[in-house]
Amino acid sequence: MIQELSERSREIFRHIVEAYVDTGEPIGSRTLSRRLNSALSPATIRNVMADLEETGLLYAPHSSAGRIPTESGLRLFVDGLLEAGNLSPEERAAIDRQCQGVERSFEEMLSEATGLLSGLSSCTGLVLAPKSETALKHVEFVSLTPGRALVVLVSESGIVENRVIETPAGLTPATLTKATNYLNARLSGRTLEEARALIQRDLEEHSAQLDELTERVIEAGLATWAGGSEGGTLIVRGQANLLKDVTALSDLERIRHLFDLLETKKDMMRLLELAQMAEGVKIFIGAESELFGLSGCSMILAPMSSSNARFVGAIGVIGPTHLNYARIIPMVDYTAQVVGRLLG
């Protein structure tokens, strides 16, 4: 449709969208005439705006003369007119510095990156990672307090996951050592699913070789890993950013509904599939995103790939439809590249 618009219509449309992205408010023909700093009169601009409204690219949210882009108009702008900016050296350095932590677990690294992206963009940040299928290298049980132990799981790619489990009464350091040795003899080189199947079969056939406490520690570890990895990882940070400009009760309910969906990881795997198929940054505008079943929000999502081109997840932001797309798209894209390299 961009090609069907005249040069004058494209210029006026672009300025209307840029004004909306900047303020979130409608802009009238008189204000736009001054902003264009050209010989176009407000009457001429009103005529063009009326034509753009008729094509479904603009609408008037109130009875005033001001117009804002429809979701179709925003999509046309993003696909055909948007000129994405570049990150400043300071922004790149901040992303690099925040992501490159030492001795952090997989989820801690993702959480740091998500919080950083939320802060830089003033939006809600989220990261999605599929259920890990990486082969395992080592497991370690570490006693914390009576009744609790830390399980450290290390993959062959170097990712470390820490989980706390409940342990049976009367547990000794020797029992933890025995459970560690038993698991390491069976985990190495297998994925978690493969290891679980083998160990559960082994426990059924040879449980007599293990004392009751050791067997219960092993089973507790398996149950914890299974629950922690089911469906993958979803981390959301900066939810309050979506509530900053909310004034209407209906908008508040819509945002709350979105939070509920995120908390239940609804449609997470569908999002991962779309991100994995995308060659670059994927943009969902308003009601286009049936994944959330609501309008009024946009989502910018970028796939994360390791140095060997293996898909490891997706990272992005959710915000109002008047996002500063030109600034946030390269920010999401660069963060995805940095995190992908570190995870790989």
Image (cartoon, rainbow, N blue to C red):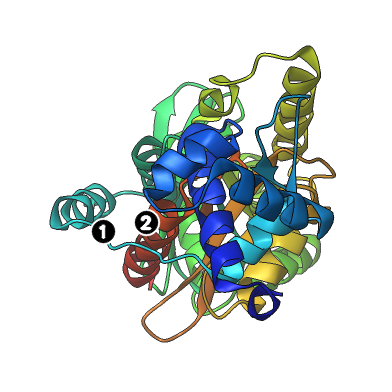
In this rendering, is residue 169 above or below 27? above
Q: Foreground: 121 or 147?
A: 121
Report the Cα–Cα distance between label 2 and label 1: 7 Å
Q: Quadrant of the C terminus?
A: bottom left
Crowding near the residue tagged with mark 1, few <14, some 14–19, many ≥20 C-alpha atoms within 10 Å: some
Crowding near the residue tagged with mark 2, few <14, some 14–19, many ≥20 C-alpha atoms within 10 Å: many
Provide residue 96's location: percent of width, then percent of height.
22, 56
| 125 left or right of 199 in image | left
In this rendering, is residue 220 above or below 79? above
Q: Which residue type carries mark 1? A: Leu
Tally the marks: 2
Residue in the image at 80% along x and 49% along y: 287
Residue in the image at 53% along x and 20% along y: 244
Q: Foreground: 55 or 153?
A: 55
Q: Are marks 2 and 1 in contact (CB under 8 Å)?
A: yes
Provide residue 49's location: percent of width, then percent of height.
68, 50
Residue under numbered circle 2: 331
Q: Which residue type carries mark 2? A: Met
Provide residue 160's location: percent of width, then percent of height.
40, 56
Residue under numbered circle 1: 87
SS state under label 1: loop
| 60 left or right of 187 in image | right
Residue in the image at 75% along x and 31% along y: 61
Q: Quadrant of the N terminus?
A: bottom right
Q: Foreground: 184 or 114?
A: 114
SS state under label 2: helix
Instruction: Tell me which label, 2 or 1, sits earlier in the chain.
Output: 1
| 336 left or right of 1 in image | left
Residue in the image at 41% along x and 86% along y: 308
Provide residue 194's location: percent of width, then percent of height.
68, 74
| 60 left or right of 191 in image | right
Q: Is residue 228 visible?
A: no
